[in-house]
């Protein structure tokens, strides 16, 4: 079962489920019935859905009793605090999520008191946490997702009062929050309830690259310069009504790298410079099927990702942007997920599933085979470190206790076993593997 429900809201994420490709095939084969966060299989910046680095602090959605609200921490008990109870009325709280930074403000989606799920912003203080615009009045709101900073705006996918889920943007003011383009307009007029459902928004300079679905074309790669006329499909990668399902995106040296499925059915590593002519497959990593790249993350002079090689095993790979420079870093005993990076260190986790108890590892890598090693081991029913975020040179992540009373404890690490520990007073995270 795949679940992505926001506490405090009856809205369930229906975006892009058709293109979701979980890497936890071992768990499915064992029939463990795990519930996974979409961040587990989303793009490289998917972690920003659940937590983010802002003003050298870690911001995330954490529980205050039974209410999910906005918290921040510098990694110490004294420096960990609730930012604000945004929704004091709903039983589940405001459920802040979908974080993006623009200027001196952190933007996110949340449900407010008497307001549905909309875009908020904060300067990091309770007093400075406010609603940007009530796009759709009522208890459901516009349900914004995939908040992404590009140029002088934050772009996002949301519902309108009389349209489905489409591309919007904001400059941080109510007046400056508007629909960019109504991409999906069905034949005969009217509106599809789901619209084009933009997802995997990734900044390319002041433009935004994203995935969208249109009748007769399927889910394909799009680009927008912030205007309706400048929002268009880049290429019908999977020709016809089929979908290439572009996702796992990462911007690197003026291009966006992503995973996509061609008409042949092979899912491989692609790249775009924001033009139709500049959108192409970078390399056929697996000649024996699909390599299915996931979790693209930039560190230094390379983009790191996981992929299946010709040996049929998923390992850690990297590319310098060329086919020749796309190589395996290291084969691992279990699938690497949740890739994030600091300036010189790549972090990720992996897990081996078992009905009698699973084992998970927190890893770090300097980009070499020798320099890719474990930091710490975790055991339990579902102990994988998830929702990894680097803030002020520290790695923050969550670990689930599992069981019927599952909780996501917040941890912090300096990259060593001894320096990896629970954050005192941080409470528990609201989302993730459960």
Image (cartoon, rainbow, N blue to C red):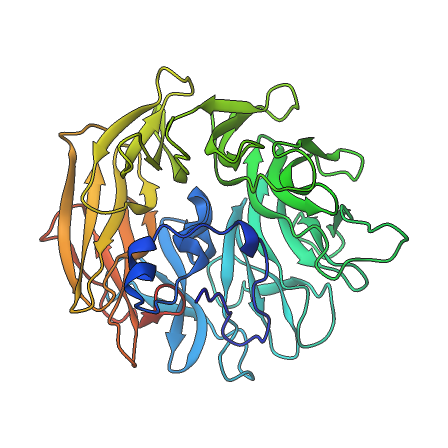
Asked whether 253 or 182 is in front, the reply is 182
| Residue appearing at x 36%, y 15% in the figure | 324
Question: How far from the left and from the top, in percent, is residue 406?
Answer: 30, 75
Q: Is residue 254 visible?
A: no
| Res 37 → quadrant | bottom left
| Residue appearing at x 28%, y 63% in the figure | 30
Question: How far from the left and from the top, in percent, is residue 205?
Answer: 58, 30
| Res 229 → quadrant | top right
| Quadrant, the C terminus | bottom left
The furthest residue to the left? 418
Question: How far from the left and from the top, in percent, is residue 57?
Answer: 36, 53
Instruction: Judge from the rendering whether residue 356 lies leftward or rightward of residue 311; answer left or right.
Output: left
The furthest residue to the top? 324
User: In the image, is residue 1 above or below residue 366?
Assistant: below
Instruction: Judge from the rendering whether residue 380 lies leftward or rightward of residue 154; answer left or right.
Output: left
**How many numbered marks have been drawn onto this rendered protein structure?**
0
User: In the image, is residue 191 above or below residue 327?
Assistant: below
| Quadrant, the N terminus | bottom left
Question: How far from the left and from the top, in percent, is residue 225?
Answer: 70, 34
Instruction: Judge from the rendering whether residue 186 lies leftward or rightward of residue 209; answer left or right.
Output: right
Q: Is residue 98 visible?
A: yes
Asked whether 172 or 154 is in front, the reply is 154
Asked whether 389 or 18 is in front, the reply is 18
User: In the image, is residue 372 above or below residue 280?
Assistant: below
| Res 397 → quadrant | bottom left
| Residue appearing at x 74%, y 72% in the figure | 137
């Amino acid at each position: 079962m795949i679940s992505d429900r926001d506490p405090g809201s009856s809205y369930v994420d229906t975006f892009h489920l058709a293109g979701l490709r979980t890497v936890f095939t071992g768990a499915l084969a064992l029939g463990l019935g795990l519930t996974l966060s979409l961040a587990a299989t989303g793009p490289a910046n998917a972690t920003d859905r659940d937590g983010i680095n802002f003003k050298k602090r870690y911001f995330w959605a954490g529980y205050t009793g039974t209410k999910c609200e906005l918290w921040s921490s510098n990694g110490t008990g004294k420096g960990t605090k609730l930012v604000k109870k945004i929704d004091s009325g709903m039983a589940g709280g405001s459920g802040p999520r979908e974080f993006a930074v623009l200027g001196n403000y952190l933007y996110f989606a949340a449900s407010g008191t008497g307001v549905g799920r909309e875009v908020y912003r904060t300067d990091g203080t309770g007093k400075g946490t406010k609603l940007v615009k009530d796009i759709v009045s009522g208890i459901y709101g516009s349900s914004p997702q995939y908040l992404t900073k590009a140029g002088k705006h934050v772009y996002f996918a949301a519902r309108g009062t009389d349209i489905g889920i489409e591309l919007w943007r904001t400059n941080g003011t109510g007046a400056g929050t508007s629909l960019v383009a109504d991409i999906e307009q069905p034949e005969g007029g009217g509106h599809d309830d789901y619209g084009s459902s933009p997802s995997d928004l990734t900044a390319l300079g002041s433009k935004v690259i994203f995935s969208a679905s249109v009748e007769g074309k399927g889910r394909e790669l799009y680009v927008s310069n912030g205007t309706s006329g400048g929002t268009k499909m880049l290429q019908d990668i999977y020709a016809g009504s089929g979908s290439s399902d572009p996702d796992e995106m990462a911007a690197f040296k003026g291009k966006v790298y992503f995973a996509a499925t061609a008409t042949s059915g092979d899912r491989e590593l692609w790249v775009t410079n924001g033009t139709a002519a500049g959108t192409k497959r970078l390399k056929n990593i697996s000649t024996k099927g699909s390599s299915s790249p996931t979790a693209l993350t930039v560190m230094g002079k390379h983009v790191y990702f996981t992929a299946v090689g010709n040996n049929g095993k998923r390992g850690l790979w990297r590319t310098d942007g060329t086919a020749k420079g796309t190589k395996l870093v290291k084969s691992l005993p279990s699938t690497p997920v949740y890739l994030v990076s600091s300036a010189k260190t790549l972090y990720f986790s992996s897990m081996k599933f078992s009905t009698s108890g699973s084992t998970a590892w927190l890893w770090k890598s300097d980009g070499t085979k020798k320099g890719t090693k474990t930091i710490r081991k975790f055991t339990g029913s579902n102990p994988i470190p998830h929702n990894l975020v680097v803030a002020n040179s520290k790695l923050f992540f969550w670990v689930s206790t599992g069981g019927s009373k599952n909780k996501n404890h917040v941890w912090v690490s300096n990259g060593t076993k001894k320096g990896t520990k629970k954050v005192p007073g941080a409470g528990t995270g609201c989302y993730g593997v459960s």
